[in-house]
Amino acid sequence: MLYLLLAIICSSSIALIFKYADNSGADRYVVTSANYLTAFLISLFMILSRGLLSGIEKEQAFADEFSNLLARQAGVLSPYSSVIWGLIVGSIAGVFFCLSFIYYQESVQKNGVSITGTVAKLGIVIPVLFSIFIWKEMPTTIQWLGIVLALVSILILNLSPRSLEKLDIRVSLILLFLFGGLAEFSNKVYQQYGLNEYKDFFLFAVFLVAFLLSAFYVRKKEAKIKGKDVLIGCAVGIPNLFSSYFLILSLDTVAASIAYPIFSAGAIVLINLGGYLIFKERISRKNKLAIALTIVALVLLSL
């Protein structure tokens, strides 16, 4: 549970730092790019310092080994194939990570840190649903109730404050939910088949691809690079890297059906407490109801 607690603390601190960045007028694209550069460099340092590049022997072609693993539906890949798997999954996940961070910051600006953090953590629904269809991890009746409550809370969050009868779609929240959920799911995809000892290659690919994409956005938007924005990005990059790092470690000792809901619910509580205590964010009754439903839903998902 220690790794899960550390993942929760890292994850919730990301939203709070983003809120500070928004209040200080920082450029979201520069912050995002600096964040991924920091995470990429740290993951590279971890690979080199642990000597993970040495002693890896190719026992079998990756495609053949992976096919055999899928046929057996048991076991994990060898060190060589784990590295390949990490680079493949990480490269795809990097796109989702980058997009989720962009919409994360946009949503913090438009909707506040509490609601943004809540919706981001609701992305847990995506790994749960994918696990059902891909690995046949069928939820219990109580977990199905949790999934329904989670979807209802998203609906409530998208209702206009003036009337519960008017649906006011917030695109940034929906895209954040989608991309954030896919980014979280990528951690499970790697852990399901790859060796945890080589997870640093997965993280390296994630943050390298995300950095390259975010750097492209910085250039496209002709953003002005300021030292303060870079420092804020560096501050985000550290918990961003270790949030995934500790979450993957926790999945070795805690079942995914329990780890993900606790990870999400814990982060939601810390984010909302931080938003209220640090930034004095007021939460409407409607949004309080949505947040309460979210926490209940995530608890039910862990049962």
Image: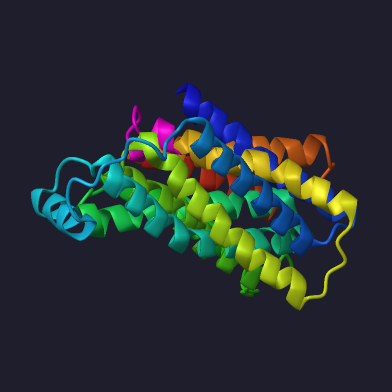
Dividing the picture into quadrants, the one containing residue 76 is top left
- In the rendered view of the protein, which quadrant contains the N terminus? top left
User: In the image, 220: left or right of 172?
Assistant: right
Towards the viewer: 220 or 100: 220
| Quarter of the image where one finds residue 251 | top left
Task: Tell me residue 225's x, y (percent).
Answer: 86, 61
Q: How many marks?
A: 0
Where does residue 85 sit, x and y in percent of width and height?
33, 53
Would residue 119 be visible to someone looking at this image?
yes
The image's colour scheme reads rainbow
Rendered residue at 66%/58% (across/down)? 104
Q: Nearer the viewer, residue 185 or 291?
A: 185
Q: Is residue 292 left or right of residue 270?
A: left
Q: Position of residue 148 (x, y in %)?
A: 40, 56
The furthest residue to the top:
2
- Give residue 280's position: percent from left, percent from top: 84, 42
Q: Is residue 127 above or below residue 296?
A: below
The residue located at (66%, 65%) in the rendering is 214
The residue shown at (59%, 65%) is 99
Question: Which quadrant is the C terminus positioned in?
Answer: top left
The stretch of residues the image draws in magenta is 248-256
- In the image shown, does 278 or 179 lie closer to the viewer? 179
In the depicted view, which residue is nearer to us: 235 or 138? Answer: 235
Magenta-drawn stretch contains 255: yes
Q: Is residue 263 visible?
A: no
